[in-house]
């Protein structure tokens, strides 16, 4: 259900925009800068939602909070199909971002409650690939709808995607559970001692010391990911169609290939981070993404274009799942929502600024090449910050300590 929720809130609520943007921009006569600001508006809403998610989950529980958030995503996506111009689309899509953020944070926090540290990276990896499934589906569905309905195709696309999200919202209400102990279970991978043991069982989800410096260090790394990955995700299809001359259907095939490859990103690199550590996982993934940005920025075609899309796809959702696992390692299940919410809040500033700066830069330069070079430079900086990330140290106390939040 976590995978389906991410499929809806991020896969459709955010990443489907990349496929809808070319035809929508042509119909509404949007400039490069306006296209960037629409994406930025979505992330402004996302950022606001991150601030209130912890409070909302505490008041009504994760399950109900996720349900209402998905209702907001689905409803506003349908309203996006009714937009008449830039301003109305900006306002509506900002609300979509609010729903996306309000869904994503508690869903990823549930992973810490349901999975111990030794399996947390893998579990987070399987949750985040929901976005990949959505990209695959939108990559062939949106061009098909556009071809079938012509100039109004992008509006029909919003209606179809939004309605699907509403269905998933009710599935979440039916199937999600806030904690494993609600149904008599323990977190997967948690240590289980014999009933006769005088020692109280202690999950490895509850180890570690979390302080301000670690929080902001992780937040800085996540900020750089937010800034860079969204530039590629938002503008790669527009680059292929407007700058490389690909038909929309062919660009959609590339988008679907990217989505297919991204299905492996979370499980592969999440499980790898369980084995080799979160720091090494960050370094490997950012290196792959930096190479992808450099290749698309260079303007090289043929095998280099395929390599760029392949590298981005195979690493696409790795950072969010490694980050969720890392924050869980430091914070433990009880503090996870607050800790991950704050780190994601910092990440949100990257998502806000990335597409806006990239869109304005493309407006001046006449192409997105310099925007992709900028993304590569920021990914390189993320590698440097990851090198200096400290490992969580075991604490003598059974509960993790989250200081300064």
Image: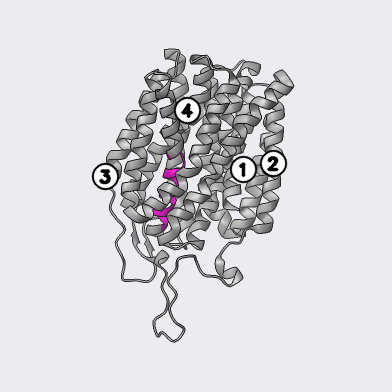
Q: Residues within 10 Å of mark 2 (few under 14, many from 20)?
A: some
SS under mark 3? helix
- In primary-sequence order, the first of circles 3 and 4 is 4
Residue occupied by mark 4: 355
Q: How far from the left and from the top, in percent, is residue 298? A: 37, 19
Label 1 CA crowd tier, 10 Å (few <14, some 14–19, many 20+)? many
Q: CA distance from mark 4 to mark 1?
A: 21 Å
Determine which residue is flagged by label 2. 164
Point 65% across, 28% down: residue? 142
In space, the residues marked 3 and 4 are separated at their CA atoms by 27 Å
Query: Nearer the observer, disc 3 or disc 4?
Result: 3
Direction from residue 95 to residue 332 in the image, left or right: left
Distance CA(mark 1)–CA(mark 3)? 34 Å
> Which label number is shown at residue 387?
3
Q: Position of residue 235 (x, y in %)?
A: 50, 25
Magenta-span inclusion, residue 173: no
Looking at the image, which is closer to me, 286 or 113? 286
Q: Residues within 10 Å of mark 4 (few under 14, many from 20)?
A: many
Q: CA distance from mark 1 to mark 2?
A: 8 Å
Residue beneath disc 1: 8
Q: Which residues are magenta?
A: 315-328
| First-in-chain label (1 vs 2) | 1
Rendered residue at 64%/18% (across/down):
28
Residue at position x 50%, y 20% in the image: 240
Q: CA distance from mark 4 to mark 2?
A: 26 Å
């Amino acid at each position: 259900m976590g995978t389906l929720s991410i499929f809806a809130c991020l896969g459709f609520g955010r990443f489907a925009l990349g496929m809808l943007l070319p035809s929508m921009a042509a119909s509404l006569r949007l400039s490069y800068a306006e296209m960037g600001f629409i994406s930025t508006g979505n992330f402004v809403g996302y950022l606001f939602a991150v601030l209130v998610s912890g409070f909302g989950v505490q008041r009504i529980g994760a399950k109900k909070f996720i349900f209402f958030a998905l209702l907001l995503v689905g409803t506003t996506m349908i309203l996006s199909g009714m937009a008449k111009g830039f301003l109305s689309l900006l306002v509506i899509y900002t609300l979509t971002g609010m729903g996306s953020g309000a869904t994503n944070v508690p869903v990823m926090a549930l992973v810490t409650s349901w999975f111990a540290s030794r399996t947390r990276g893998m579990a987070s990896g399987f949750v985040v690939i929901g976005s990949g499934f959505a990209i695959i589906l939108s990559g062939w569905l949106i061009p098909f709808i556009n071809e079938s309905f012509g100039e109004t195709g992008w509006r029909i696309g919003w209606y179809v995607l939004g309605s699907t999200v509403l269905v998933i919202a009710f599935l979440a209400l039916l199937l999600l559970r806030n904690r494993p102990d609600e149904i008599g279970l323990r977190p997967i991978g948690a240590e289980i001692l014999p009933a006769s043991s005088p020692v109280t069982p202690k999950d490895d989800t509850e180890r570690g010391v979390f302080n301000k410096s670690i929080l902001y260090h992780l937040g800085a790394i996540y900020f750089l990911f937010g800034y860079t990955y969204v530039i590629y995700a938002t503008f790669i299809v527009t680059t292929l169609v407007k700058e490389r001359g690909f038909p929309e259907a062919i660009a959609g095939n590339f988008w679907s290939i990217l989505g297919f490859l991204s299905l492996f990103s979370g499980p592969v690199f999440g499980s790898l981070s369980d084995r080799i550590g979160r720091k090494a996982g960050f370094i490997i993934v950012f290196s792959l993404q930096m190479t992808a940005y450099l290749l698309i920025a260079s303007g090289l075609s043929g095998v280099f274009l395929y390599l760029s899309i392949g590298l981005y796809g195979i690493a696409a959702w790795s950072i969010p799942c490694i980050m969720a696992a890392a924050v869980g390692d430091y914070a433990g299940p009880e503090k996870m929502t607050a800790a991950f919410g704050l780190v994601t809040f910092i990440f949100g500033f990257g998502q806000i600024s990335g597409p806006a700066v990239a869109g304005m830069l493309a407006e001046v330069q006449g192409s997105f090449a310099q925007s992709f070079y900028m993304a590569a430079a920021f990914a390189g900086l993320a590698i440097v910050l990851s090198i200096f990330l400290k490992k969580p140290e075991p604490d003598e106390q059974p509960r993790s300590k989250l200081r300064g939040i």
